[in-house]
Amino acid sequence: MHRPLPEAPIPFTPRATCSRCLRPVAFCWCPHLVSLDTRTRVVLLQHPREREVAIGTARMASLCLPNSELHVGIDWSSSAALARALSDPDRPAALLYPGEGAIDIVEHPPSGPVTLVVVDGTWSLTRKLVARNPVLGVLPRYAFRPPAPSEYRIRREPSESFVSTLEALVHVLGALEPDPDRFLAMLSPFRAMIDAQIACEATQANHRGRRPRPPKPPRPRARSPLHDRAADVVCVIGEASSWPRPRDGEAPAWPEELIQWVAHRPSTGETFEALIAPEHPLAPGTAAQTGLSSDDVLHGEPRAHALQRWRAFVRDTDVICSWGVFGTGLFEAAGAFLPADRVDLRRVARAEANGNVGSAGEYLQRLGGSLEGLAPIGRGRAGERLARIAAVVRKL
């Protein structure tokens, strides 16, 4: 008896792919794209790993914005394309990325058109990308507070304050351009992509999609080391005049210089504040960045007098609490005294959350606190931030 010949394997036929959005034709969102002219030049720098993510939004944003360009890579130090994009004198470059010293782009927008550099990728990837490229670190840095949680239901975000690249551009361009409501149309392809992905997952029982994970239960918080020394706690924050670094990587024109120091003792309500006259020219953008009047800073008290007043305020047994170490490091570099006992609240928060926690205000909300009705402790941005640091200390 002859055995039947095995059937020939069915040849693999790849799914048809749209050449524009690079998605399978069944999931193409191109019919929902819009074209919006802007005076803002948008430069999207995408990490190579993010290029492989089918539900990314950088390409979608670039297709909606004719006055934009999308580049993929990690090291931008010798990129002629980026150097050309950053050298437009009519649109000075600015980096949209949160971090220490970032200016709220909604409250303090640039005075004219800009070239907006946007990094695209996960929080971990973009943080490394920015740190690796000095050409990005020297740019004026802007950030914003999302008005609502992300609609990115098919991708898990680190916290409610994180949004997709496209959503970020909808919000930021709305602050920089006339007729802000027109940018809401960019959400149409974004929502279509999400709806299609969710529908696909619902019809495929064994589909292993990137479903949002349920939030982890909060860890029980251990007794804070601040609790037993509440009377000694002093919350502090400092502001600086920081000149941008030249694009060739050389040192800035003038060194970073302390111009404001604010402290608060929560147990008694005592507050210390000093505006310190700079010994070098004031960096451009300092007023917008700190919320202080340039005239007030330039007519501040001499550094020696401010440090003498501070020494009379602080005790050797105090516990200095700050959010990060930028301000305290700058303060010591100015020749000031700081007690030996110190607590970096941001480090404590990250250890407890096992990850990034954002700003002091975001962490306060995570602890169940509210920013509403929180009176500033001091002038400018430092006064607002110090109030949030003090509120975190009270929660801990």
Image: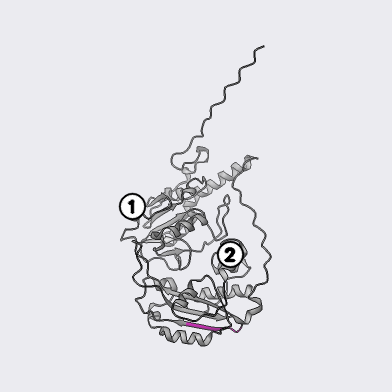
Where does label 2 land, which residue? 350
Where residue 240 sits: x, y (%)? 43, 74
Q: Among all residues in the image, which is located at the extreme front?
A: 340
Horizontal side of 369 relative to 35 (left or right) equals: right
**Residue 62, above or below 371:** above
Location of residue 27 in the rendering, given as x and y in whole percent from the top left corner: 52, 41
Quadrant containing the N terminus is top right
Point out the stretch of residues depicted in magenta.
267-273
Would you name the residue on which mark 1 appears?
80
At label 2, which amino acid type do we have? Arg
Judged from this view, the residue extending furthest toward the left is 89
76 inside magenta stretch: no
Residue found at x 47% / y 81%: 336
Asked whether residue 177 appears in the rendered view, the answer is no
Q: Say above or below: 275 vs 117.
A: below
Give, as a three-letter code, the residue at label 1: Ala
Specify the quadrant of the image occupied by residue 252.
Answer: bottom left
Whether residue 272 appears in magenta in the rendering, the answer is yes
Name the foreground residue: 391 vs 189.
Answer: 391
Q: Secondary structure at mark 2?
A: helix
Q: Position of residue 231 (x, y in %)?
A: 62, 82
The image quadrant of residue 175 is bottom left
